[in-house]
Image: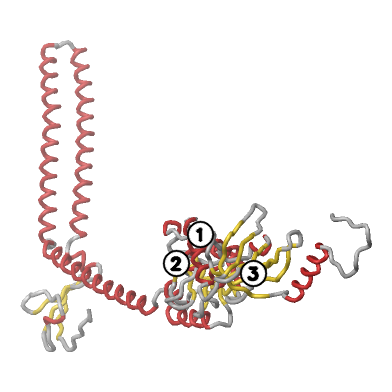
Amino acid sequence: MYQTDHPRDPGIFTVSDLNRRAKQMLEVSFASVRVEGEISNLARPSSGHWYFTLKDSGAQVRCAMFRSRAGMVKFQPKEGDKVEIRAKVSLYENRGDYQLIVDAMKPAGEGALLLAFEQLKRKLTAEGLFAEERKRQLPTVKRVAIITSPTGAAIHDMLTVLKRRWPMLEVDLYPAAVQGEDAPQQLINALYRANRDNMVDAIIIGRGGGSLEDLWAFNNEVLAREIANSYLPVISAVGHEVDYTIADFVADMRAPTPSAAAELISPDGQQMLRYVNDLQQRLVRSQRERFLYAQRSLAQLQARLRGPKQALQSRAQHLDQLEIRLQRAMTSRLKEPQQRLQRLQASLAHLHPQRGLTQSQSSLNQLRGRLERAMQQQLQKKRTELTGGMRLLNSVSPLEVLNRGYSITRKTDGTVVRDTAELKSGDEIETLIHSGKLTSTVTDIQHNDD
């Protein structure tokens, strides 16, 4: 420092005092100003602070933006960008440089939000958050969570559509602000609660139409990542058909309007009713065709069914065959003992001694007894078969049917009456029952309705 031997004049400032006083005056006089200009000499050291020069066609000024404020900027500035800043005027005392301490920055003009939107869109696209392969198909929705303002037009429109199309669908409302500084965090909290509760099949998040600034809550990066990480499928329904937000790109499905989202998740009740009626008509036609086929089959079977007389003849023929076989078996059984007896008699003639004769006589008696028993057994067996056959014949006999309480009605010419349409009042008919025959005159005819 420059030293002097005489006392300093109170009216003379040191450089440090001058810069300090100038800084105080600048910061008090220009505590908050808005300045527009073009960025140049932009530097971003590892400290996270930004240093740059803001210039126009006639002048320039140094600027500093500290890390805490730089982190709040919604886009990434670059050389040549025209921006609007909010800052306080200050002075860097060490060099005596006049500078601006920047609090906020946005692109200049109406493209500020659009630029921020495009930069975030490019960033999330590069990370794959918009990729179609990571998006899920909607399941069959029986219960849906709707995240929106409870007082807005969007919830009214969605509930109206659901009531008209499919009143059975259950709705859980997760209220949240959809506009303003607090809106992104409220939307994030509601999305978290819906996934945590896990009581629904899908989530609709959205609001009605508005300006780009009104819809800005749905362009929040943190909200976009929460939608991408949602366990439940998410439908984004923000604004009108021409409005697009980051939430639309990252959601599993985008609906052009809230009403369209309600239509996406709900079946058309009228269409479902028409489908059920069509199935009913097809079922009636199918049953009618099956009934007609069964009638034709029954008619064919009735035509092939043999009468009782044929059944009796068949049983009688079978009985005759059994009788013939019995006679043959008896004859065969008799021939064998007779032949054996003859052989024994011949042997006896050669073995005349009394002992041999006695033994032969004993054997003959035994054989005769066995023969008689065998014949009795065969006869008894054939009698049993004959009795069974006769019982079977009796069971299909028309007389046995009459014995069970049935009757046969015939005209006087002997024709069997099978349908009431064959008779008319005044006809004489004969009714055969088990114990005899009845003769009567027809006075009244009643037809069964098919």
Q: Nearer the viewer, mark 1 or mark 2?
A: 1
Residue at the location (77% across, 69% down)?
22
Q: Is residue 405 left or right of residue 45?
A: left
Nearest the eye: 294 or 349? 294
Q: Amino acid at mark 1?
A: Lys
In the displayed structure image, the side of residue 392 where residue 251 appears, left or right? right
The residue indicated by pointer 3 is 104
From the top left corner, tell me how far across and down residue 73 is, in percent: 61, 65
- Nearest to the observer: residue 352 or residue 225: 225
SS class, disc 2: strand
Q: Horizontal placement of 138 versus 380: left or right?
A: right
Q: Is residue 412 above or below residue 323?
A: below
Instruction: State the residue lying farthest toward the left.
Output: 413
Q: How many marks?
A: 3
Which secondary structure, mark 3? Answer: strand
Mark 1 falls on what kind of element?
helix
Label 1 to label 2: alpha-carbon separation? 20 Å
- Whether residue 405 is visible to the viewer of this picture, yes or no, is no
Residue type (three-letter) at the residue carrying disc 2 = Met
Q: What residue would you read off at disc 1?
A: 123
Tell us which disc is closer to us: 3 or 2: 3
Residue 129 versus residue 279 in the image, above or below: above
- The percent coordinates of residue 169 (x first, y second) are 48, 74
Callout in the foreground (3, 1): 3
Q: Does the rendering let one see residue 373?
A: yes
Residue under numbered circle 2: 253
Mark 3, other Cα within 10 Å: few <14 / some 14–19 / many ≥20:
some
Earlier in the chain: of badge 3 and badge 1, it is: 3
Residue 308, x across and y down, in percent: 13, 62
> Which label's residue is closer to the chain start, 1 or 2?
1
Above or below — where is 322 with respect to 351? Answer: below
Task: Report crowding for label 1: few under 14, some 14 to 19, many 20 or more residues within 10 A (C-alpha).
Answer: few
